[in-house]
Image (spheres, grey):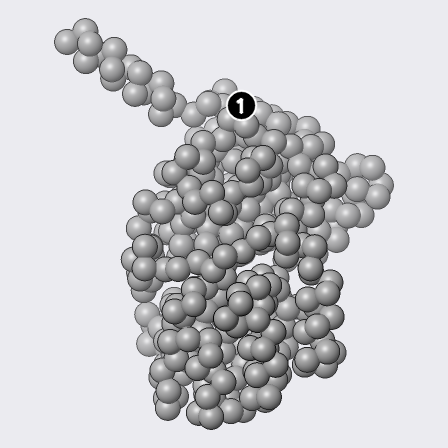
Amino acid sequence: MKKLLMAAGLTAALSAPAYAEVSGKLVLYTSQPNQDAQQTVDAFTAKHPNVEVEWVRDGTTKVMAKLRAEFEAGAPKPDVLLIADMVTMEGLKAEGRLMAHDGADVSAYDPAIMDTDKTYFSTKLITTGIVYNTAAPMQPTSYKDLLKPEAKDKIAMPSPLTSGAATIHMAALTANPDLGWALYEGLADQGANPKGGNGGTYKAVAGGEKLYGFVVDFLPIRNMLDGAPVEFVFPEEGVSAVTEPVAILSTAQNPDAAKAFVDFLLSEEGQKLAASQGYLAAHPAIAPPEGFPARDAIKLMDFDPADALAKDQSNKLKFTEIFGG
């Protein structure tokens, strides 16, 4: 009995949050939708009631513009960033703007979506694949299917000049030796006119104005459950993903609370919250939301955020040459 009690005590100790006694103000800058951000903050403060979270929400581009202005003024306000993509985090890391959290437990996660130096941590998988209207004459299974005659003048795409997810998708596809820039040149020949973000692309396909497109997974998957005339395809080559990474700024005023926030997002509870919000959790053991295939059936394309950062401007220039400004 004594051994059992000792084992139970050890289990409790291992499962107890490392920063249970944190307190004070925590400033979060995030690109999460407002409802998701509020749910995330509420769940965190339920576990850490002595922390007061002040949060600012906007798109990643606008969040970064605000943060850049604060850097210039020498007064960055956030302790924690929770934004769309690893490439932006990679840029901040290169500038020495991020604090390592060596104690973060990422043992269960795919190393490909985590920074080896533990300065940022992926929390979700928001993948980009193919959406098609159920009235379409072809059901694509490969990106190359969009180069078939049936898709001529029927393709919608978000622009990587506007959408962070489209930028990541472009970097992943063009780095794939079986696709490369030839795919984008072919899409241009097909009459594709990339513009705006994922919402506009989804609406064009769901409304029948176009029949095929690239889009983030949750838009068609959530809406098809409500009867929208769309299907989402995880192509055979794989999907790209923005991973909504979280990071602590090197200038954080409350690093202990910031570490507790990171730990919460990476915990089973935090990952189940992501799934309940309709996203693929980054943790491979968390069941996908309704409408998604089994997690092990989803193939992620190879993606190197440092390489994507280095090539970002040249990629966007090449894209503009193909499609026009």
Pointer 1 residue: 22
Residue at image position (32%, 45%) is 285
Is residue 219 visible from the viewing direction of this image?
no
Q: Residue furthest top?
A: 2
The image position of residue 75, as x and y in percent, is: 79, 37
Q: How many marks?
A: 1
Quadrant of the rendering where the N terminus is positioned: top left
* Disc 1, SS: loop
Three-letter code for the amino acid on which mark 1 is drawn? Val
Q: Quadrant of residue 167?
A: bottom right
Q: Nearer the viewer, residue 20 or 192?
A: 192
Residue at image position (19%, 13%) is 4
Residue at image position (53%, 65%) is 176
The image position of residue 203, as x and y in percent, is: 50, 78
Instruction: Classify residue 244 as left or right of residue 142.
Output: right
Where 191 sits versus 44, above or below?
below
Where 146 sits versus 34, above or below?
below
The image position of residue 300, as x and y in percent, is: 44, 58
Is residue 105 visible from the viewing direction of this image?
yes
Q: Nearer the viewer, residue 188 or 256?
A: 188
Residue at image position (61%, 84%) is 188
Where 187 sits versus 41, above or below?
below
